[in-house]
Image (spheres, rainbow, N blue to C red):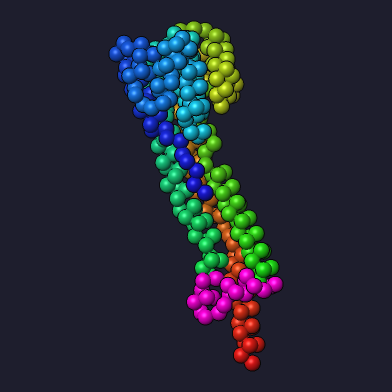
Amino acid sequence: MKDREPNLVAIAAIVQRLAVLLGAGVTPTAAWGYLREGALAEQVATQSGGGAAIAEAIVAASIQHAPPGERNAWRGLAAAWAVATDAGAPLASTLRDFAESLRGLSQAQREIAVALAAPQATARLVLVLPVVGILFGVLLGFDTLRTLFSTGPGWVCLMLGAGLMLLAWRWNRRLVARARPRDITPGLALDLLAIAVSGGGSLAHARASVALTLARLEVDAFADDPGIDATLELSARAGVPAAELLRSEARERRRDALASAQSAAQTLSVRLMIPLGVCVLPAFMVLSVVPLLLAVLDQTSLSR
């Protein structure tokens, strides 16, 4: 039931190094070449050195070299790079903000993993209960294994118990999967729009640039996020720069996503009781208790 978590800390470290190099005056292509962070960075450096746009090079390299769970983070970096380039926003500060966002998401992942640890351990424990029951019957001196594998009623119990255990295993996997956060870049569209407006262009051009970039790079984020309109309206009403308000709203989205994921993890332990009662306990009965009773009756009849 354990899926590999995206290594956002490593991605954030790469982005931070890029920000430092660009801030020191290194060209983008050279900065990727200096990284020496594996095949992905090498491919980006090679493709951008050959004339390809860096954003597209990041997406292509992530498809070939990054695990599936990390690709949306790399696409988010590509989108931030493309929007900053189009808006003329400083790339170094843009990358520092994106790195900080990834670190916050990584911290959220760690907290969620801690919250999920106990429910997952409970799920694994209850799934071995029928096996424990079978071994307990053997230790008591009853041939429950022979009853299960060499008699008609035993085969019925074995098939029914195995089916219930398989159902419980799949059910538990689905419950745990639902408790995990699906979006590893919450608030990304707000961050991208903040980058776009910080370049000094009009709001209309900034929104068009973000929408086009998200569609072109196939980034899993919503360019028509309803929070964008509310934030821009507040900015216009208060007469304050929109960029900081958009970043603040993006941070709030990440906090909300963390709270939601933590709540789902905490309720998971309760929801795991459903497959326990519906599948695991009946499987325990048909795989251990019923064969034990059959073995007792069989030995009793033989002793007579």
Which residue is at a point 60% across and 52% down the rendered structure image?
Answer: 171
Magenta span: 134-153
Quadrant of the image containing the C terminus: bottom right
Left or right of 299, for residue 32: left
Is residue 44 or residue 180 the one in the foreground?
A: 44
- Residue closest to the eye, 39 or 166: 39
Number of numbered labels in the structure image: 0
Residue 178 in the image, given as x and y percentages of width and height: 57, 43
Tell me residue 66's x, y (percent): 47, 30
Q: In the orientation shown, which residue stands out farthest toward the bottom?
A: 304
Q: Can residue 149 be found in the magenta stretch?
A: yes
Rendered residue at 34%/24% (across/down): 36
Q: Is residue 268 left or right of residue 48?
A: right
Query: Is residue 43 shown in magenta?
Result: no
Quadrant in the rendering for residue 13: top left
Q: Residue at x 59, y 67 (%)?
A: 284
